[in-house]
Image: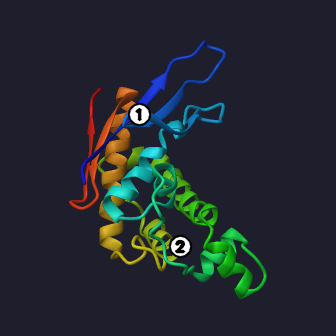
Amino acid sequence: MFMSFQFKETPRPKDQKPIVSLFYNGKQLGDSLDDNSDSNLFIRYHDDVHLGLFALCNWSPVMDELLGNESKVPPLLSPIAKMILHLGDTEQEINSLYTQTNYQCRLEENIVFLNYNEALHKGFYEKRKPSASIVNITKQLAEGTPLGMMSKEEISENIVKIFDVHRQLITNRSGYIDIDPEKKFYQFRVA
């Protein structure tokens, strides 16, 4: 199913950080974001990474929640993800908490920011690939999800595609991202 999302940066006075809003069918999804940093890290655009996971990997609890979809994530969690998310002390507590969407979103946010951090330091993968360690950690954290079921090569290729679109978005400061999850289509378009 073809879908088009608009990212719109709103300029603000010099003493305030610019904000980015995400729209689908004319309706804003979630909150407007700034960089929440003194540095211009372009993190305000990071929802495009969630959108890329949704389109290319058939997995994004964050996008599912923003769109009002039922999450596709099975109630499985890798041992390393359990440790990172600190979900509870007993297996029963962990499994009951994990079925709640907010914990699935936390897992995705950890994966996104882990990848974002390396991408930031590698020019958002322009003419480069993610490190083997980032791909391995991503695969381990995403165990039991559609992302975790992909090969390491597929994960690496998708990360590069996602950050290619990210580079185009931050260069233009606004624009559209067109997707079709069934066809694994993910593309930037100038506003």
Instruction: Identify which residue is drawn at 42% across, 69% down.
Output: 132
Query: In what quadrant of the picture does the N terminus appear?
Result: bottom left
Q: Which mark is residue 141?
A: 2
Q: Nearer the viewer, residue 84 or 9?
A: 9
Query: Residue 7 shows which numbered tag?
Result: 1
Residue 3 x, y percent position in the rendering: 29, 46
Q: Judge the density around disc 2: few (<14), some (14-19), many (≥20) Cα neighbours within 10 Å.
A: many
Of marks 1 and 2, the one in the foreground: 1
- Locate residue 71 relative to residue 174 in the image: left or right: right
Mark 1: secondary structure = strand
Snapshot quadrant of residue 181: bottom left
Mark 1 vs mark 2, CA separation in Å: 28 Å
Quadrant of residue 75 in the image? bottom right
Q: Answer whether labels 1 and 2 touch (C-beta < 8 Å).
A: no
Out of 38 and 180, give the one closest to the viewer.
Answer: 180
User: Which class describes the residues within 10 Å of circle 1: few (<14), some (14-19), or many (20+)?
Assistant: many
Query: In this rendering, does residue 63 appear at all?
Result: yes
